[in-house]
């Protein structure tokens, strides 16, 4: 049974966790960058229902929900965020890692997947990337390599339609991104819209 089901995470509980962080950030209690995930609760819960405790999760700077659903205790996650690690949360004991660098998690995820295949492990790798990251060369190369070599990895494209403050499809001049127009068999995706900006919680905080 996945940890997400054991803990009975609901969209409401996830929103409550993020709302608390947003309020604390706007009050100036969190003095470091945060990236919030409003709108992605339901699809993430559905995805994590398939993820086992021994699986590996690699994600980007927007990873609070992924950490919670992978099994990181809320108080431990909150402490890490308050200590300035929101954009680079890594919890080796729960097999969850994130990177603040665009695409930084991808090559590591591929390497782990290669190791799992060579050792005939039953574990799987889940690599979460944004819609703009999915357009980068490193993502496209990794998707093709992993597909051709049948690596035990699933790429999850989290499409919120923007890259920082720019509309992703406007950047590329296309209504369809490559993950939609030419999908690989080892990728899944979901779309969402957040009430929060790319970073922060909507209120300018001067430290």
Image (cartoon, helix red, strand yellow):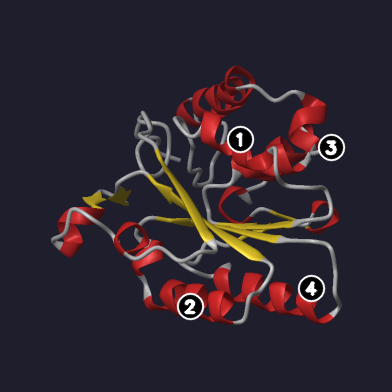
Marking on residue 46: 1
Q: Earlier in the sequence, mark 4 or mark 3?
A: 3
Q: Please state the horizontal and vertical placement of residue 92, each as a whole percent of the image.
A: 80, 59
Q: Within the image, what quadrant is residue 47 found in?
A: top right
Q: SS at mark 4?
A: helix
Marking on residue 30: none
Q: Earlier in the sequence, mark 1 or mark 2?
A: 1
Asked if residue 159 is positioned above or below residue 98 in the image, the reply reads: above
The answer to whether the residue labelled 1 contacts the one labelled 3, judged by CB atoms less than 8 Å apart, is: no
| Residue neighbourhood size for the residue with mark 1, other residues' Cα within 10 Å, grouped as few (<14), some (14–19), many (≥20) | few
| Residue neighbourhood size for the residue with mark 4, other residues' Cα within 10 Å, grouped as few (<14), some (14–19), many (≥20) | some
Q: SS at mark 2?
A: helix
Q: Please state the horizontal and vertical placement of residue 136, each as a whole percent of the image.
A: 37, 72
Label 2 sits on residue:
144
Q: Please state the horizontal and vertical placement of residue 108, each as a whole percent of the image.
A: 64, 74
The answer to whether the residue labelled 3 contacts the one labelled 2, judged by CB atoms less than 8 Å apart, is: no
Q: CA distance from mark 3 to mark 2?
A: 31 Å
The answer to whether the residue labelled 4 contacts the one labelled 1, judged by CB atoms less than 8 Å apart, is: no
Label 3 sits on residue:
1
Q: CA distance from mark 4 to mark 3?
A: 21 Å
Label 4 sits on residue:
116
- Residue at image coords 84%, 37%: 1
Q: CA distance from mark 1 to mark 3?
A: 13 Å
The answer to whether the residue labelled 1 contacts the one labelled 2, judged by CB atoms less than 8 Å apart, is: no
The answer to whether the residue labelled 4 contacts the one labelled 3, judged by CB atoms less than 8 Å apart, is: no
Q: Earlier in the sequence, mark 4 or mark 1?
A: 1
Q: Earlier in the sequence, mark 3 or mark 2?
A: 3
- Residue at image coords 44%, 30%: 39
């Amino acid at each position: 049974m996945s940890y997400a089901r054991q803990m009975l995470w609901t969209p409401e509980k996830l929103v409550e966790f993020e709302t608390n962080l947003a309020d604390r950030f706007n009050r100036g209690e969190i003095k470091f960058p945060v990236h919030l995930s409003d709108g992605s609760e339901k699809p993430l819960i559905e995805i994590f229902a398939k993820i086992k405790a021994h699986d590996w999760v690699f994600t980007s700077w927007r990873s609070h929900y992924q950490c919670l659903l992978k099994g990181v205790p809320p108080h431990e996650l909150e402490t890490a965020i308050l200590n300035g690690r929101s954009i680079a949360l890594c919890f080796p004991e729960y097999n969850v890692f994130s990177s603040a660098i665009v695409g930084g998690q991808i090559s590591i995820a591929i390497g782990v997947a290669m190791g799992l295949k060579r050792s005939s492990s039953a574990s799987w790798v889940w690599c979460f990337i944004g819609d703009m990251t999915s357009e980068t060369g490193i993502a496209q190369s990794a998707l093709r390599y992993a597909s051709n070599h049948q690596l035990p990895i699933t790429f999850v494209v989290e499409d919120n339609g923007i890259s920082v403050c720019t509309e992703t499809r406007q950047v590329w001049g296309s209504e369809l991104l490559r993950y939609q127009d030419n999908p690989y068999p080892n990728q899944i995706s979901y779309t969402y819209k957040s009430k929060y900006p790319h970073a922060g919680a909507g209120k300018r905080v001067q430290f």
